[in-house]
Image: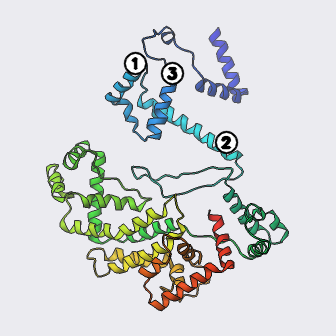
């Protein structure tokens, strides 16, 4: 009779009040469950129950602290040594299964974190989205985001973009954050009026991302490898896969080259993961590597002397691009001043390689061509190349802001002009005088600052 009554109530809720039924199911799944008789009468020396506060606290700490934050594999919960360690720490702790963590706990934590981020975004007045060429220890790329509500510089930048793009009358300029006394407190009245005049005349300009442009530049060159390089890269990829997928090969590799040594995997997003992989393979003792592959019956993966020479050239060519990528990702110093020195140094590096390479001619030609295309505005500005096209749209990196930033940075100054610029002394002297004149011109300086504000 009771079962029949419960069935009728359940059917009624399902047909007439589905929202109440859904909320009941959600509360039942997320809320504490009634303990079983076994758990209720469990002795103090036995393990925790699944709903015990200490059990839930330690399981949550295990998943969030070790698996998620430290990046350890879920298989660690099945490792006998780790289970013994946890038993020593707390004999009453009951280790969760890998299936429970993957199918239940991690999805619930993910949904909870998504709701938390959505709630934070819904109440934030301003959102700053920060992107970077970051990757974890396994070279897996990821997106880092920062949600903030008090980033004053970002607020000013967004206000400037919105107001200057949507208004044309002078009255609306009073709404901009540039009239804040805290910004212009060091300026006298005449200079403040001059700044306001420049704000009225100067539009906001989009600056290209140097790190992303470097990424695209190198990928243009990697797309055109030589026949020797393509075959050698295939061998490197198979060796890396074996070191991560085959326990037998991984153990033999560590016995040969040392404990903890491995060949990193590549990432399709970050080109320097490929450079890092090939660099490690080239640096290995080729005699020991050949002996290892013969013992494992993998002679077809043994790099030939020609393969090793081609890969060595590949690493040496892209080493300068890897150093430039690392330089531009600094977070303790300004990076806009490194654009001009890096581009000029890369241009000289590629030029010097002609006549010295044997297997990577197509790679060098593709890198030089892409460098001239993607930094055409900067090369025209510094009189390295001449623009003969009829295009009226601005070329990338054609702003005077880039050479001015490098000169005002004491780390670089005019060193790039003296050491790496291909021009003669007369051309270099002309460029030096032009940059110095722009730096001492308050009109040009304020224009550059205004263009830079949206990117702070």
Instruction: Sort mark 1 into few (<14), some (14-19) or many (20+) by Cα contacts within 10 Å.
Output: some
Q: Quickly name the residue at label 3.
A: 54
Q: Earlier in the sequence, mark 2 or mark 1?
A: 1
Q: Residue at x 65, y 66 (%)?
A: 453
Q: Quadrant of residue 95?
A: top left
Q: Quick one: 344 or 206, which is closer to the camera?
A: 344
Q: Is residue 57 left or right of residue 357?
A: right
Quadrant of the image containing the N terminus: top right
**Residue 235 placed where, x, y %?**
26, 59
Q: Quadrant of residue 442?
A: bottom right
Give the mark toward the camera: 2 or 3: 3
What label does residue 126 carry, if any? none
Q: CA distance from mark 2 to mark 1?
A: 39 Å
Count the marks. Answer: 3
Q: Earlier in the sequence, mark 2 or mark 3?
A: 3
The answer to whether residue 420 of the structure is visible from this angle is: no
Please say if 435 is above or below 21. Answer: below
Please say if 390 is above or below 403. Answer: below
**Residue 152 placed where, x, y %?**
69, 56
Please say if 241 is above or below 42. Answer: below
What label does residue 119 carry, if any? 2
**Residue 81 placed where, x, y %?**
32, 29
**Residue 216 placed where, x, y %?**
46, 68
What element does badge 3 sit on? helix
Q: Quick one: 211 or 15, which is closer to the camera?
A: 211
Q: Quickly name the residue at label 1.
A: 91
């Amino acid at each position: 009779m009771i079962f029949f009554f419960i069935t009728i109530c359940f059917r009624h809720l399902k047909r007439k009040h589905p929202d109440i039924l859904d909320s009941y199911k959600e509360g039942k799944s997320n809320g504490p469950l009634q303990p079983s008789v076994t758990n209720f009468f469990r002795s103090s020396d036995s393990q925790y129950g699944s709903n015990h506060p200490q059990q839930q606290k330690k399981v949550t700490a295990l998943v969030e602290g070790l698996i998620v934050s430290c990046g350890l594999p879920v298989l660690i919960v099945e490792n006998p040594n780790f289970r013994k360690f946890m038993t020593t720490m707390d004999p009453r702790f009951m280790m969760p299964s890998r299936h429970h963590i993957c199918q239940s706990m991690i999805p619930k934590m993910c949904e909870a974190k998504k709701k938390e981020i959505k709630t934070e975004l819904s109440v934030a007045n301003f959102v700053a989205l920060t992107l970077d060429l970051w990757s974890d220890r396994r070279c897996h790329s990821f997106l880092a985001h920062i949600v903030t509500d008090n980033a004053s510089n970002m607020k000013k930048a967004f206000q400037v973009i919105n107001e200057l793009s949507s208004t044309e009358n002078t009255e609306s300029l009073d709404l901009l954050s540039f009239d804040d006394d805290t910004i212009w407190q060091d300026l006298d009245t005449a200079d403040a009026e001059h700044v306001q005049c420049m704000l009225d005349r100067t539009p906001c300009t989009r600056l290209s991302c140097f790190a992303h442009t470097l990424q695209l530049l190198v990928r243009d060159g990697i797309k055109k490898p030589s026949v020797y390089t393509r075959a050698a890269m295939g061998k490197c990829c198979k060796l890396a896969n074996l070191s991560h997928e085959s326990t037998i090969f991984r153990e033999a590799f560590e016995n040969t080259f040392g404990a903890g040594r491995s060949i990193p995997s590549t990432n399709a997003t970050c080109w320097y993961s490929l450079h890092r992989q090939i660099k490690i393979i080239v640096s290995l003792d080729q005699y020991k590597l050949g002996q290892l592959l013969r013992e494992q019956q993998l002679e077809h993966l043994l790099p030939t002397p020609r393969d090793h020479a081609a890969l060595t050239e590949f690493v040496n060519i892209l080493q300068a691009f890897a150093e430039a990528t690392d330089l531009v990702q600094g977070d303790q110093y300004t990076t806009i001043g490194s654009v001009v020195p890096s581009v000029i140094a890369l241009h000289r590096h590629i030029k010097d390689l002609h006549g010295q390479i044997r297997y990577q001619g197509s790679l060098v030609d593709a890198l030089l061509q892409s460098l001239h295309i993607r930094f055409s505005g900067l090369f025209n500005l510094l009189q390295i190349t001449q623009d003969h096209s009829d295009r009226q749209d601005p070329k990338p990196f054609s702003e005077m802001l880039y050479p001015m930033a490098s000169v005002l940075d004491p780390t670089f100054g005019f060193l790039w002009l003296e050491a790496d610029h291909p021009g003669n002394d007369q051309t270099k002297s002309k460029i030096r005088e032009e940059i110095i004149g722009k730096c001492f011109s308050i009109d040009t300086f304020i224009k550059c600052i205004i263009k830079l504000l949206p990117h702070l």
